[in-house]
Amino acid sequence: MQAKNGAAVAGLAEALAARLGVDCVLTGDEMSTYCRDWHGDVTSGAVAVLRPRDTQGVADAVRACAELDLQIVPQGGNTGLVLGAVPDAPERQVVLSLERMKTVRNIDADDFSAVVEAGAILSEFKDKVEEQGMFFPLALGAQGSCRIGGNVSTNAGGINVLRYGMTRELVLGLEVVLPDGSIFDGISTLRKDNRGLDLKQLFIGAEGTLGIVTAVAVKLVPLPEKVSTALLGLNSLEDAITLYRRARRECCDLLSAFEFMPPIAFTLAKEAMPDLPEPIATDYPAYVLMEISGSGLVDIDALMEAFLEGVLGDGLVVDGAVATSTAQARNLWLVREGMNEGQAKRGPHLRTDVSVPLSRLADFVADAEAAVKAELPDCISVSYGHVGDGNVHLNVLPPAGADRAVIDRKIYEAKQVVNAVLDRYHGSISAEHGIGRLKRGDFTTRLSPVRHQMLKAIKQAIDPRHMMNPGCQLNFDTE
Amino acid sequence: MQAKNGAAVAGLAEALAARLGVDCVLTGDEMSTYCRDWHGDVTSGAVAVLRPRDTQGVADAVRACAELDLQIVPQGGNTGLVLGAVPDAPERQVVLSLERMKTVRNIDADDFSAVVEAGAILSEFKDKVEEQGMFFPLALGAQGSCRIGGNVSTNAGGINVLRYGMTRELVLGLEVVLPDGSIFDGISTLRKDNRGLDLKQLFIGAEGTLGIVTAVAVKLVPLPEKVSTALLGLNSLEDAITLYRRARRECCDLLSAFEFMPPIAFTLAKEAMPDLPEPIATDYPAYVLMEISGSGLVDIDALMEAFLEGVLGDGLVVDGAVATSTAQARNLWLVREGMNEGQAKRGPHLRTDVSVPLSRLADFVADAEAAVKAELPDCISVSYGHVGDGNVHLNVLPPAGADRAVIDRKIYEAKQVVNAVLDRYHGSISAEHGIGRLKRGDFTTRLSPVRHQMLKAIKQAIDPRHMMNPGCQLNFDTE
């Protein structure tokens, strides 16, 4: 396709408005927030932003785009971290936002299930579910802005994965508009259904490259009535992993979160939140934030107390603070949240999202941090994450006050250093964030020929015209 | 392809032996157990049975079959209930048995994971895992004979699904030989890995129609050290479902099994096991066998006691027996196992494996049993199953002593009656057994055009020559 001039692009936008109604189509400055990524690092443009009101409207939009030879970038809350929902060809792409499709179609507490449209904001959906005494366990930092369709399309993780699984494990059914405009009606709340291939699995984590998720049926669990949260100081990351294994056994399936942090977490959090409470000394080599929760007849507080008595007695945990109220629990989580804000305040830095087998986590972090120190001595590594999932965010902060060009180079070099160590551990360059456009190169270069061939064959089978989110995950036109 | 005479078929078997080694190829009478289904209802034949020793051997076998224009029916323990692993074109199909690939490649208790080859027998694998203090939660009647590759290919369910999920949720990685003989090396124990499409999902539940699973990486959980089992008498199935909801809340994520049975379960079990103990009166309208389990610091016995105190006090449960030893727990499960044997002893009958949303389970069973009674008054309905999953085995026993032709007709009619009610409830005709060849017709007639089109497109993408398990799930050559 040839580059188009402004008039040609405007003509396409008008054609879309004629077919779908002006109400459905945004152009010009109204598109800016839809064409910018969450961090504000990348700003792009589009022919138009389409905002259909219902599933049929999405199907109509897909057909209109096909007729006009336009490509579609589906978008939920646009909170992704890998540019999966940001267009990269402004003259031939539209953003299709699901933000108007927010209806909670059904919450059935007796069935432990709900059906919700793709544009519902995660936290709003969770609140509605909780009003009925139930709980939707997906929990992540962006939950006040991200939308459930995006969570499905990126197979979102978060802090409760070790107990409840990734989004994939919470999905019972999907409704998807396919690239030919037909509707895959896979909404079902059946827990068990072995009727042939489980086609919905294809769309979970596909980042919109095979179709547009318009509604989701999900599992619910009973709302945990009792939550016990503890912040613990330890002598090493290795001890933190030993502690996880022990918590997994001793607290059984009631362990719901287990995050580790380095001592610099407090420094960073304080830079963002000067009044941050310090419930324990801030100079232990490693910290764990753990949560056990449940409803019903199990005494959660007694369980936490018995567990901590054992691990403090053995010296595996050196110090600890247990929240005795929801407000105190909130305060303990502030360190984990504040450290992210603190990193952001220090300016651009390398954010990774890697995973290795749990049994190799401590070695990996030690090796990767040592490699960063050797190659980039003026940078600081900050490793934290979800121990139970083997998922580390090993971030690297460039020296304060450096030029942007220097910073960008350091970030690039740090990524190469971390990935080189990661490859030795057969780890994943994307544990939970996805590939999007940001990690496409690093993904593609690591792809085996067999896997590459399968990805192309599946794309060809479902989206032969490469209309859905081109440039995301793989560049099928050229790779 | 034209029908071949015996000499032509023998020539193909010789050609396979020449390529793969005589040791790998069975022919003649040696094939009989591989060409017969688990119940002994169907006997077929094949060009040969291939028994490769390793993954490369499977790949070589696939290439040899492609050269000779032969189709492949992959087979694990051949314990499936829907003829998914039984050939149906003896002159052009080979059975590829994974039975020699039994190696447990790795058990890593520190990583909560294991890697095992497809031919390992489920119970033998579970035993090896338990020696290391870990637990692989898949549990089903056939576990002494079924093989893990078959469990993956059929996405097996079983009695622990409500807590640990179907096989899909236990799989971390797969190694698969594809129809072109290439090897998809997806063995990985990463808990979180969002690098593009999760291709392994395609092969789980595919019943060997897209490739041959040769090895599996699975999740392990800590071995439950304490198990409490109770057999409870109730006034109705509706009460049993209310009890499930309450158990799910009050026992939290420690509930590991919840099976319901009708009173006829005792009659049937006694026909198979005359010495069956009767721990409670056998004339309540409904029974529940429930199990809670855990390791570590939670007092499982106290939890069961507190739970039962509440539900007996409220009258939701009328009577109950709690096992105080492993032997007693075994005895309680005997009813559940014996009722299956008792049904088998009564001769051919309708076995269904349906699911509906949990909130509609009691209504569905009442409606379906009433319909059977109205249409087939001389038949007996026996409904039991996994309440927490909405999965009922609603079986229908024809009158004793009827002619085989009458019995077959009654079985067919009963299936039509049950499926007609099921369709009104938007249920699944196959909750856990799969489609195979037995349910292909009922599956195909219920398939939406969009889903049908997608299945064909996926098949075309991965197995364009329709070489893998043709006739299973869909007949892609004609449908």
Image (cartoon, coloured by chain):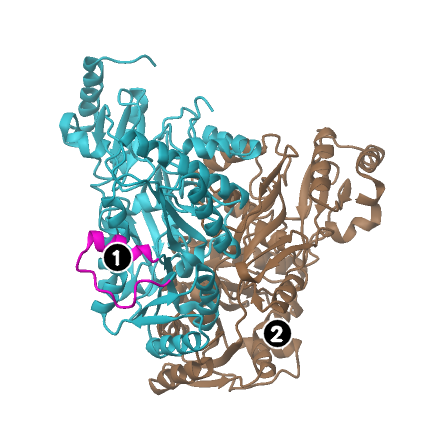
Chain colours: A brown, B cyan
Identify the chain of the residue marked 1, using the numbered disc in the image: B
> Does the residue at mark 2 contact the one at mark 1 (Cβ under 8 Å)?
no
The N terminus of chain A - image quarter? top right
The residue at the point 61 percent across, 56 percent down is A81
In what element is the residue under mark 1?
helix
- Check residue A263 for magenta coloring: no
Residue drawn at point x = 41 percent, y = 61 percent: B163
Camera-nearest residue between A476 and B270: B270
Q: Position of residue A34 (x, y in %)?
A: 74, 51
Left or right of B426, for residue A449: left
Q: Amino acid at mark 2?
A: Gly
Measuring from the top left, give residue B50's x and y in whole percent. Answer: 22, 31
Foreground pick, A165 / A399? A165
Q: Which mark is residue A338?
A: 2
Tell me where the magenta segment starts and ends, as one range.
Answer: B263-284
The residue singled out by tag 1 in the image is: B126
